[in-house]
Image (cartoon, grey):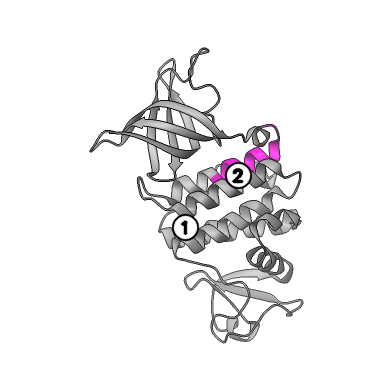
Amino acid sequence: MIITDSAIILHSRKYSETSKILTVYSAEHGKLSLLAKGARSPKSKFGASLEALSHSMITVYKKPQRDLHLITKAETATPLRRIAEDYSRLTIGLAIAELTSVTQEPEEVNSAIFELLCTTLILLNKTQNNEYALLVAFQIRLADLMGFATNFTDCYVTGVSLINYKNQEFVFSISDGGIMSPEVSQYREGFVFETKTLSILQLIAECELSQAINVDIPELQKAQIHDFFAQYYGFHLDKRLHYRTHKLILHTD
């Protein structure tokens, strides 16, 4: 069966002297593994359309009962060249692609996740700063679409708003997906947030995706947020989640 679909290239690796194996996330067929023959050749017909983080229109010869399919044609659908031109944008883009790859099962279609992925990468391609805030926004919205939404605003036990609490530590229940007021959390366990970190998460969760790039996140809060999402996704997916780009994003040794 021959299919044509819009897809984001999540990852590529060398295969033989001239070919590549790709992982893509497509609009109508979900995550696919593809063999691109001749993609590494200097005269490749694919050009730059199969580079990681590209948004391309692809044509695939899809074989039933096979895990690896043959890509026969690809053309750039939305130019995202600026992502690869900047170190910060590139590392954030790779983290978004990695999260998409590890959280999605092969050929499970979710058009809302595909739209979120495309929109986030388009915004990343345009932004000049605060790239990490887009990764945070993506993680919050992806969790929602996958069925384990986060609640950073109201105590999930009492319903009390936590917007105006100051100079407190807050405990977030990983299993229940919600923040707790200090009065409730003294009797429970979970991930501990400082007030500043929680305020950042509240702001990003409530704003439009396009406005997330206006949120500046200090390095200390980045590290705490990064650890939180690794634990949160790991628990709900029942797998260990550790970004390969962790050290690059957080500038750690």
Residue 61 position (above or below residue 102): above
User: Is 90 colored magenta in this rendering?
Assistant: yes
Is residue 128 toward the left or the right of residue 26 in the image?
Answer: right
**Residue at point 60% right, 42% down?**
93
Q: Give SS at disc 1.
A: helix
Residue 181: image quadrant is bottom right
**Residue at point 40% right, 58% down?**
238
**Residue at point 55% right, 84% down?**
187
* Lower position in the chain sequence, tag 2 or tag 1: 2
Q: CA distance from mark 2 to mark 1?
A: 23 Å
In percent of width and height, residue 98 lies at: 51, 44
Is residue 152 toward the left or the right of residue 71 in the image?
Answer: right
Please name the residue that numbered disc 1 is placed on: 234
Local packing at callout 2 (Cα closer than 10 Å; few below 14, some 14-19, many 20+) is many
The residue type indicated by label 2 comes to Leu
User: Is 1 colored magenta in this rendering?
Assistant: no
The residue type indicated by label 1 comes to Gly
Please name the residue that numbered disc 2 is placed on: 121
Residue 244 position (above or below residue 109): above
User: Are the residues flagged by discs 2 and 1 in contact, CB closer than 8 Å?
Assistant: no
